[in-house]
Image (cartoon, rainbow, N blue to C red):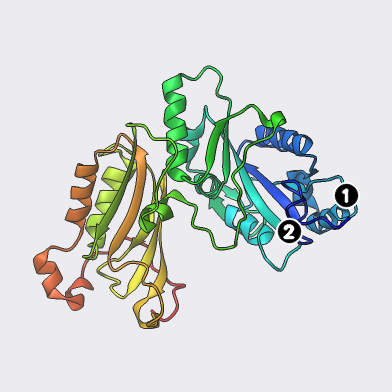
Amino acid sequence: MEITPEDEPQGASIGGRADVVAVVGACAPERQELAARLARAENRVLLPARRMRAEPEVLDQAVTLLGRMRAAQGLVVEHPLETPAMEIIGLLADPTMATRLSAVVCVVDAAHLLDDLEAEDFVPLQDGAHHAARAELMVQQIEYASDIVLVNTSGLPAHRLRTLEALLSALSPRATVRRDGGVADGWPRRSTEYSQEQTRAGWICQLNGDFAPEVTTEDVTVMRYDQLRPFHPGRLHAVLETFFFERGAGQVLRSAGFCRLATRPHVTAQWDHVGAGFALEPVSFDHQIREEDEVLAFGQDVAVVGLGLDTRRLTAALDEAALDDDELAAGPMAWSTFPDPFPDWRTAPNL
């Protein structure tokens, strides 16, 4: 009998493409356990992270095998931390591939989340040639998840757990946040199909004006900073040191968006900050923008997530880092003389 989309159970192969649930997370034992439980509960074939590391071709083999197993409902693919979230989505949601990504389940250790977000260590990526900050890899997995599962919650006060849930919801407002348990009974997952272009991250939702987290608390602060004037790079560097790394206005855990430095006036940079790490990378050049292109930002547009933030003080500090009236009137020739402590963008084309 031919199976139509209406007849297929959730998770079945759709249009000849194998349905995939990706399981990610920094805590390997908890991630492995949840992936195995989820595979059993939903009658899916499990591909553990150790096999994904050792056998790059195992995914293609599993998809082929799945086509012969009429009873199986799809795949659960466990990914180690060293595989960036966007690489996972790019691979499994590729419309030319034989897979359909319907969920990304992120396992988060409640007892260590805040410490992990401020960790300063780097881990080697799966390609073996590059490294990335552990905190950044963790945040990306959270931001692009459809489901977030808090584990190791036993013994933590209810207020702290609620704060953690609100923080995760701020980072990933479209995700369902739950505490571990109930996997064997199945999850009421939202109907989701990932595409290679994703706008799930909380900072993107804030900048797009569609930020609506499920869980909120007074101690988790979310703000958007926008400013048309470019930053004086020296003053911005001082603000970062005082307010983003030394908690001068509360604990900033994540900030991201777009900005412009006066010393590099024709370039829009991506602002990417997690815990103790910060980067500015060029993403758009004024002379390359076509009439039909969408401008990323005219000045500064940054989303900030933290704990107990004094938003008025932080906004005032950032405003002080922007050019004042006299500096703005002096123009780019004068701006080029400002001290600029940020790294050169040597790889940026056509600068």
Q: Which residue is mark 2?
A: 99
To which residue does mark 1 refer? Answer: 70
Q: Position of residue 239 (x, y in %)?
A: 25, 50
Instruction: Classify residue 299 by image quadrant.
Output: bottom left
Q: CA distance from mark 1 to mark 2?
A: 16 Å
Q: Residues within 10 Å of mark 2 (few under 14, many from 20)?
A: many
Left-right relation of 25 to 272: right
Of the pair 119 and 220, the residue shown nearer to us: 220
- Tag of residue 265: none
Q: Amino acid at mark 2?
A: Thr
* Residue 278 appears in the figure: no
Q: Secondary structure at mark 2?
A: strand
Residue at position x 62%, y 53% in the image: 125
- Asked if residue 94 is positioned above or below residue 293 in the image, the reply reads above
Q: Quadrant of the N terminus?
A: bottom right
Could you tell me which secondary element the residue under label 1 belongs to?
Answer: loop
Q: Residues within 10 Å of mark 1 (few under 14, many from 20)?
A: few
Seen from this angle, which residue lies furthest left?
326
Q: What residue is shown at x 76% (from left), y 43% (from top)?
A: 48
Image height check: is 317 above or below 229?
A: above
